[in-house]
Image (cartoon, rainbow, N blue to C red):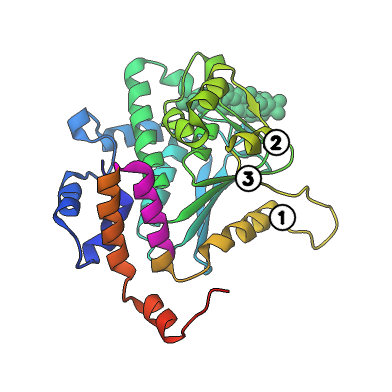
């Protein structure tokens, strides 16, 4: 098991153990697929760039919360090939953001994402190209989920197909009133291929995942909360002036968890991530290593000096 998002801070830590060093050696940048699996990242990037349209925009805020925006409104924010490449580049940027603590993913025009761009899907409907796109997106979404940032998908409107899969690559999902997450793959003669099924099982359990995929169920905010796919529902927006936008509401919601120094918040994400992904013994050893990066650190020393009480 390889956790690439843990790499950089731990390389700076003096408490790196042998296990960790071995994990680092096994690590490849793409995390899941590399040349060992016949995957050539550059070749796939070039192929995907042949299907342009839209963009993925990144705004890094001083608060330590970044906003990643899917921007392809004429196609309900469907993923063109160039947007897949854009997403990979934005994830690289976020991997190197030392001051980052949180991430919100949203779509423009009050909708989240309608999956892959069907024009591109039609053009690369042969199995070889489909596999390549699938490996590229699995690598990117795995790296996205493993960022040392606490992430939330802000779902307005629809999250369909690959859009639903993208929501599962975030730590949390917030749903706006009237929004729907739907794994429509079955209706397209498909199953998820961007890692959405594997992540969905971990989020809602295998029984619920089977129902959602097998029935292509429309998950509204109520059902989402009931089965644990949604972590919160945004209040209906009043037209009155001064009402917070969904993005502001999501930012407020997330800032509860990102309050504090970046190294501490990143450490929180890393220990949860290792607990989620690694076998227990490895997770415990990773937790020890991450603990070593904050023990005696500036935030820890300051808290000790101020004799803080937790009332
Ligand atoms: C491993 C990945 C698997 C996948 O993601 S497969 C793709 C799954 N997604 C889909 O099948 C979505 C298909 N689209 C729809 O169901 C509907 O367009 C949708 C999203 C419910 C919206 O319906 P409406 O509100 O009636 O709007 P509409 O149909 O007129 O759409 C507005 C314009 O957006 C376009 N659009 C929507 N989803 C798209 C997509 N995925 N790829 C390419 N174009 C897409 C749609 O063609 C329309 O364009 P135009 O105005 O006709 O030029």
Whole-percent x, y for residue 187 in the image: 57, 15
Image x and y of residue 109, in percent: 67, 43
Residue located beneath label 2 in the image: 222
**Residue 249 located left or right of residue 296:** right
Residue at left offset 54%, top offset 34%: 163
In terms of secondary structure, where does tag 2 sit? helix
Query: Within 10 angstroms of label 1, few (less than 14), some, or many (20 or more) residues?
Result: some
Q: Residues within 10 Å of mark 2 (few under 14, many from 20)?
A: some
Kindly tell me whether residue 99 is visible in this rendering: no
Label 1, label 3: how many angstroms apart (C-alpha)? 13 Å
| Quarter location, residue 82 | top left
Q: Tell me which numbered mark, 2 or 3, is placed earlier along the sequence.
A: 3
Extent of the magenta region:
265-279
Read off the residue under disc 3: 108
Percent position of residue 6, x then y: 30, 54
Where does label 1 land, which residue? 245
Occupied quadrant, residue 84: top left
Residue 54 sits above or below residue 152 on the image: above
Instruction: Please report the residue visible at 56 percent of the width from the left and 21 percent of the height from the top.
Output: 211
Q: Earlier in the sequence, mark 1 or mark 3?
A: 3
Residue 311 % position (x, y): 58, 74
Quarter of image, ligand 1: top right
For mark 3, does the 10 Å Cα neighbourhood hold few (<14), some (14 to 19), or many (20 or more) residues?
Answer: some
Residue 297 is labelled as: none
Q: CA distance from mark 2 to mark 1?
A: 21 Å
Q: Earlier in the sequence, mark 2 or mark 1?
A: 2
Quadrant assignment for the N terminus: top left
Disc 2 or disc 1, which is closer to the eye?
2
């Amino acid at each position: 098991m390889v956790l690439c998002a843990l790499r950089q801070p731990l390389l700076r830590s003096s408490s790196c153990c042998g296990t960790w060093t071995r994990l680092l050696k096994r690590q490849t940048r793409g995390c899941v697929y590399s040349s060992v699996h016949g995957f050539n990242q550059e070749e796939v990037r070039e192929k995907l760039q042949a299907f342009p349209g839209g963009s993925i925009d990144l705004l890094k805020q001083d608060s330590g919360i970044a906003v990643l925006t899917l921007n392809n409104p004429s196609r309900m924010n469907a993923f063109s090939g160039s947007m897949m490449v854009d997403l990979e580049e934005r994830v690289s940027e976020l991997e190197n953001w030392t001051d980052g603590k949180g991430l919100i993913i949203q779509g423009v025009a009050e909708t989240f994402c309608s999956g892959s761009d069907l024009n591109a899907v039609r053009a690369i409907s042969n199995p070889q190209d489909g596999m390549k796109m699938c490996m590229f997106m699995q690598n990117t979404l795995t790296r996205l989920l493993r960022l040392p940032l606490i992430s939330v998908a802000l779902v307005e409107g629809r999250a369909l197909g690959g859009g639903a899969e993208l929501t599962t690559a975030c730590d949390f999902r917030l749903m706006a009133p009237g929004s729907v997450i739907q794994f429509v793959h079955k209706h397209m003669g498909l199953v998820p291929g961007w890692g959405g099924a594997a992540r969905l099982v971990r989020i809602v359990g295998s029984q619920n995942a089977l129902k959602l995929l097998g029935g292509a169920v429309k998950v509204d905010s109520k059902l989402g909360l009931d089965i644990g796919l949604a972590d919160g529902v945004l209040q209906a927006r009043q037209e009155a002036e001064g009402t917070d936008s969904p993005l502001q509401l999501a930012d407020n919601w997330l800032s509860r968890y990102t309050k504090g120094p970046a190294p501490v918040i990143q450490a929180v994400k890393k220990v949860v991530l290792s607990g989620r992904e690694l076998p227990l013994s490895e997770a415990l050893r990773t937790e020890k290593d991450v603990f070593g990066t904050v023990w005696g650190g500036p935030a820890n020393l300051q808290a000790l000096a101020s004799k803080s009480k937790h009332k």
